């Protein structure tokens, strides 16, 4: 029995034309989930019906594969585990993730993030974004306590992801409570096989190889989502 953590990598494939769509979905998906959670918190408190991710199943005579949709960032008290999910996890013989925990923590991954996500000493973010987008982004970073000097080292796609993740984390949504992270922990404890759908460099290059114009568009969409999130928070 196998659990595949996400349908997105299989659905998208790995072609460059899907990169911006996929990058935007990562960021806007996180913020949309945060906004939805905040907007419906009171309703969920009154509704005791359990909430859990959707599950799809494919099977033949001797094997079963479960597809489980997940969110990378969650609050500690977000209810997502169900009896069905627990049974699947306990019976699974392998877990497939976009990237394995070993890949995520590897020196190679850190080196790739540095080389593909950061500018060297002779370049900076302001050289690659329209002035309006840069000013907006700088204000968003400063509001969250991150100085412009640190932001300037980031390439546009990395800056877009950073501001999205920081905004979600400041709203209480943390990676250590994400479904994929917790599934990886359980698989490691049970000593079952963990398989990666992608290689670290392939995943990062999907984003790093986008044009400056495409990355700037992603940043604008992300900032719009953050503005919507803040509007919901102030209600």
Image (tube, helix red, strand yellow):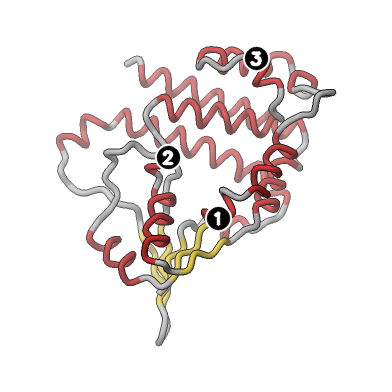
The residue pinned by badge 2 equals 73
Give the residue displayed 37% in from the left and 65% down from the top: 190
Q: State left or right for residue 135 relative to residue 11.
A: right
Q: Are marks 2 and 1 in contact (CB under 8 Å)?
A: no
| Disc 2 to disc 1, C-alpha distance | 19 Å
Indicate which disc, 2 or 1, sits on the residue closer to the N terminus: 2
Earlier residue among tags 3 and 1: 1
- Residue closest to the eye, 186 or 226: 186
Quarter of the view holding residue 62: bottom left
Horizontal side of residue 102 vs 77, given as left or right: right
* Labels 3 & 2 near each other (Cβ < 8 A): no
Q: Residues within 10 Å of mark 1 (few under 14, many from 20)?
A: few
The mark found on residue 148 in the picture is 3
The residue indicated by pointer 1 is 102
| Numbered tag placed on residue 220 in the rendering | none
Element type where label 2 sits in the image: loop
Residue 61, located in which quarter of the rendered image? bottom left
């Amino acid at each position: 029995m196998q659990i595949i953590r996400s349908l997105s990598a299989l659905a998208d494939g790995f072609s460059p034309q899907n990169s911006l769509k996929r990058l935007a979905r990562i960021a806007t998906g996180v913020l949309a989930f945060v906004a939805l959670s905040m907007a419906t918190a009171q309703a969920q408190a009154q509704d005791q019906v359990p909430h859990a991710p959707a599950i799809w199943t494919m099977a033949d005579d001797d094997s079963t594969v479960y597809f489980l949709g997940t969110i990378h960032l969650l609050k500690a008290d977000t209810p997502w585990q169900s009896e069905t999910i627990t049974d699947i996890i306990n019976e699974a013989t392998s877990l497939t993730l976009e990237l394995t925990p070993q890949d995520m923590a590897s020196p190679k991954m850190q080196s790739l993030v540095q080389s593909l996500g950061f500018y060297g000493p002779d370049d900076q973010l302001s050289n690659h974004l329209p002035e309006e987008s840069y000013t907006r982004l700088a204000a968003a970073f400063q509001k969250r306590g991150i100085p412009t000097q640190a932001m300037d080292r980031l390439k546009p796609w990395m800056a877009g992801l950073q501001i999205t993740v920081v905004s979600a984390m400041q709203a209480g949504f943390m990676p250590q409570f994400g479904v994929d992270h917790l599934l990886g922990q359980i698989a490691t404890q049970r000593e079952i096989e963990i398989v990666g759908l992608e290689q670290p460099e392939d995943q990062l290059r999907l984003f790093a190889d986008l044009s400056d114009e495409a990355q700037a568009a992603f940043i604008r969409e992300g900032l719009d989502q953050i503005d919507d999130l803040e509007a919901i928070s102030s209600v």
